Image: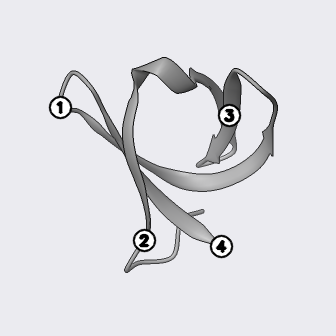
């Protein structure tokens, strides 16, 4: 499911949650992976557009 992640600094990331653990979320977007620490995430919502 595509999601939009709002970070505490105000930036937004779109992608698909590939994996998660107790402290982090692995987000896949445009063929690349980004490791996000949960303390830096303000919110996660379903994305209205399809993430690749």
Residue ID for mark 1: 10
Q: Earlier in the sequence, mark 1 or mark 2?
A: 1
* Image position of 8 with respect to 6: above or below: above
Percent position of residue 5, x then y: 41, 47
Whichever of callouts 3 and 4 sits on the residue coming sooner in the sequence is 4
Q: Quadrant of residue 10?
A: top left
Residue where numbered disc 4 is placed: 1
In the visual, does 39 lie left or right of 22?
Answer: left
Q: Residues within 10 Å of mark 3 (few under 14, many from 20)?
A: some
Spatial CA distance of label 3 from label 4 is 14 Å
Mark 2 element type: loop
The residue carrying pointer 2 sits among few (fewer than 14), some (14 to 19) or many (20 or more) residues within 10 Å by Cα, namely some
**Which is more toward the observer, 39 or 26?**
39
Q: Nearer the viewer, residue 13 or 20?
A: 20
Could you say which disc has been placed on residue 25 in the image?
A: 3
**Quadrant assignment for the N terminus:** bottom right
Q: CA distance from mark 2 to mark 4?
A: 8 Å
Q: Please report the residue visible at 27 percent of the width from the left and 26 percent of the height from the top.
A: 8
Q: Which is more N-terminal, label 4 or label 2?
A: 4
User: Tag on residue 47?
Assistant: 2
**Who is closer to the viewer here, 18 or 39?**
39
User: Along the horizontal axis of the image, is 21 left or right of 8?
Assistant: right
Mark with earlier residue (1, 4): 4
Note whether 25 is above or below 36 in the view shown. Answer: below
Q: Label 1 to label 4, Cα distance in Å?
A: 22 Å
Name the residue rendered at 55%, 26% in the picture.
38
**Mark linked to residue 22:** none
Q: Secondary structure at mark 4?
A: loop
Measure the C-alpha gap from mark 1 to mark 3: 18 Å
Q: Residue at x 60, y 62 (%)?
A: 52
Q: Nearer the viewer, residue 28 or 9?
A: 9
Q: Are marks 1 and 4 in contact (CB under 8 Å)?
A: no
């Amino acid at each position: 499911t595509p999601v939009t992640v709002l970070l505490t600094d105000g930036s937004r990331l779109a992608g698909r949650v590939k994996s998660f653990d107790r402290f982090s979320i692995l987000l896949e977007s445009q063929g690349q992976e980004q490791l996000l620490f949960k303390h830096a995430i303000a919110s996660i919502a379903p994305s209205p557009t399809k993430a690749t």
